[in-house]
Amino acid sequence: MHKALAMLAAGYLAVVGGVVQAQEGELPPAPYDFRTIECGELDNDAGYRPLRPSHVAGEDTDILCKVTVALSDKTKGSAKPHTVKLTVSHGTKVTYEQVRDARVLSVGSRVLLFVIPAEKLPTEPGKVTIRAELSKPVNKPGFQEVTYTLSSED
């Protein structure tokens, strides 16, 4: 009886050990490509329009950013989910941050949409940077930025 239990336990460990080996032999995550970031303004009058290079503080417009990531057929590894982190900064101060899952399970691309509410945008004059960054592993460049200048109300 003890011999049968020992054989059964050995068989179980062999199966469990095989599962662990299969997981260890799995390919690492494939790097994604950061294709583009396109941002525009959303307002009640015009709908969507391209992002202007300068704004006046106090304008009540939300910003829509379209981020495109891709999985190339030339990359090695398995298709695993990544994240895209979008930040809005004014100088060194971050005024808005959002992280979204980016999942491309086969060769091709995926578009992620980010809406930045007007109340989260900086209100003081200066340079505003909208930055989208793709989690690692990533083919370079792993981030892109869009900027505009904010001037005071006259």
Image (tube, helix red, strand yellow):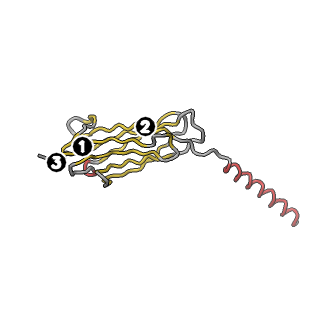
Q: Where does label 3 land, which residue?
A: 152
66 relative to 30 in the view: left or right: left
Q: Residue at x 18, y 44 (%)?
A: 56
Residue 90 as seen in the image, left or right of residue 85: left
Image quadrant in which you'd find residue 49: top left
Classify mark 2: helix, strand or loop: strand
At label 1, counting other C-alpha atoms closer than 10 Å, the crowd grade (few under 14, some 14-19, many 20 or more) is some
Going 55% across and 44% down the picture, which residue do you hit?
80
Q: Is residue 114 above or below residue 6?
A: above
Q: CA distance from mark 1 to mark 3?
A: 10 Å
The residues tagged by marks 2 and 3 sit, at their Cα atoms, a distance apart of 33 Å
In the rendered image, which residue does mark 1 sit on? 149
Q: Nearer the viewer, mark 2 or mark 3?
A: 3
Q: Amino acid at mark 2?
A: Thr
Residue 122: image location, x then y, percent: 25, 51
Query: Where is residue 118 drawn, in percent x and y?
Result: 25, 48
The amino acid at mark 1 is Thr
Mark 3 secondary-structure assignment: loop
- What quarter of the picture does the N terminus occupy? bottom right
The circle on residue 68 is 2
Q: Residues within 10 Å of mark 2 (few under 14, many from 20)?
A: some
Q: CA distance from mark 1 to mark 2?
A: 24 Å
Judge by depth and name the residue closer to the eye, 59 or 91.
91
Counting from the top left corner in percent of width and height, residue 149 is at: 24, 43
Say which element carries label 1.
strand
Give percent across and percent down for residue 53.
25, 38
Given the image, on which type of amino acid does mark 3 rest?
Ser
Q: In this rendering, is residue 8 above or below 69?
A: below
